[in-house]
């Protein structure tokens, strides 16, 4: 459990770096923007792998009984979460997390101005429902709390950074997913980053369901969802 908690702590600290402008901009100035994001992505994948490796070595302590409906929650929530994360990262979004620079937000911001954070939280909560044990509660619950807990910080920093532009950009979107669409403040639209995110998400989901998830994590989502 000690290694698992240490790995999870390292992952959370690593993903706090983009939220600290002084540290992020210092690293970008030293490495260059492309090198920074490439190195950051590589380290993130390695640390995430360490988290899951350490989690697999923690004793299984059940908290609730598994059921087929729980697997269906994951099957629906996980792709939706991945799509939001990818669409958010690929889109220009001065209001929240993104790997692209610019002032005009992409179409995904009409759904929520924090697509990456909401996507990560939805993915994590979807997995939490289907994994009723202590390590999963700590792992996926920690991911979800970190993502949702980062939203107020992102809001404050975007307000300060954008200044007078904040009101004009934020009034066409919302924190809660789909709220701005439902109350008519913005129309539903699409763009290239959304199409790319949809294609990548579809391909990744099909691969995972075809055996990729079982090979990586020793669990077959379809088998769990159809179990009696």
Image (spheres, grey):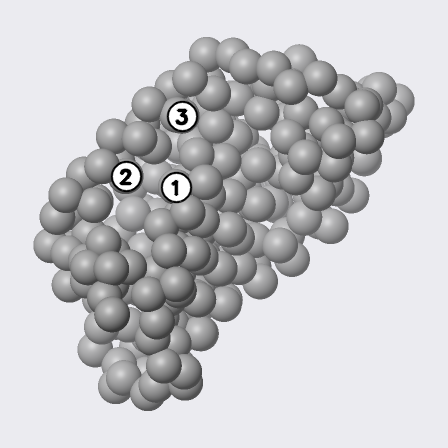
Report the Cα–Cα distance between label 3 and label 1. 11 Å
Residue at image coords 38%, 76%: 132
Look at the numbered discs 3 and 1 and tell me whether their residues touch, using CB distance below 8 Å. Answer: no
Q: Secondary structure at mark 1?
A: helix
Q: Nearer the viewer, mark 2 or mark 3?
A: 2
- Badge 1 local density, few (<14 within 10 Å), some, or many (20+)? many
Q: Is residue 26 visible from the viewing direction of this image?
A: no
Residue at image coords 37%, 56%: 72
Which tag, 3 or 1, sits closer to the chain's start?
1
Look at the numbered discs 2 and 3 and tell me whether their residues touch, using CB distance below 8 Å. Answer: no
Which quadrant of the view contains residue 137?
bottom left
Q: Position of residue 40 (x, y in %)?
A: 37, 40
Quadrant where the C terminus lies? Answer: bottom left
Look at the numbered discs 1 and 2 and tell me whether their residues touch, using CB distance below 8 Å. Answer: yes
Q: Which residue is mark 2?
A: 205
Up the image or down, 128 lies above or below 214; here it is below
6 sits to left or right of 107: left
108 sits to left or right of 39: right
Q: Which residue is mark 3?
A: 197
Residue at image coords 43%, 56%: 73
Which tag, 1 or 2, sits closer to the chain's start?
1
Residue at image coords 15%, 63%: 218
Quadrant where the N terminus lies? Answer: bottom left
Report the Cα–Cα distance between label 2 and label 3. 12 Å
Please state the total of marks drawn on the protein image: 3
Q: Position of residue 8 (x, y in %)?
A: 40, 67
> In the image, which disc is placed on residue 79?
1
Q: Secondary structure at mark 3?
A: helix
- Quick one: 74 or 20, which is closer to the camera? 74
């Amino acid at each position: 459990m000690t290694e698992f908690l240490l790995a999870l702590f390292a992952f959370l600290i690593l993903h706090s770096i983009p939220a600290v402008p002084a540290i992020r901009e210092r690293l970008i100035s030293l490495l260059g923007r492309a090198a920074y994001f490439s190195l950051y992505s590589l380290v993130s994948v390695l640390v995430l792998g360490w988290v899951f490796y350490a989690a697999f070595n923690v004793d299984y302590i059940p908290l609730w009984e598994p059921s087929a409906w729980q697997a269906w929650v994951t099957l629906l929530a996980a792709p939706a979460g991945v799509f939001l994360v990818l669409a958010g990262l690929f889109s220009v979004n001065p209001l929240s997390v993104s790997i692209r620079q610019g002032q005009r937000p992409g179409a995904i911001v009409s759904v929520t101005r924090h697509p990456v954070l909401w996507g990560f939280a939805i993915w994590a909560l979807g997995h939490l429902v289907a994994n009723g044990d202590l390590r999963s509660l700590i792992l996926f619950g920690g991911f979800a709390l970190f993502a949702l807990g980062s939203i107020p910080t992102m809001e404050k920093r975007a307000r300060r950074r954008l200044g007078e532009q904040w009101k004009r950009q934020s009034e066409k979107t919302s924190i809660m997913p789909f709220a701005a669409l439902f109350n008519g403040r913005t129309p539903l639209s699409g763009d290239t980053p959304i199409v790319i995110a949809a294609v990548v998400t579809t391909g990744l989901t099909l691969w995972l369901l075809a055996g990729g998830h079982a090979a990586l994590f020793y669990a077959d989502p379809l088998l769990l969802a159809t179990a009696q």
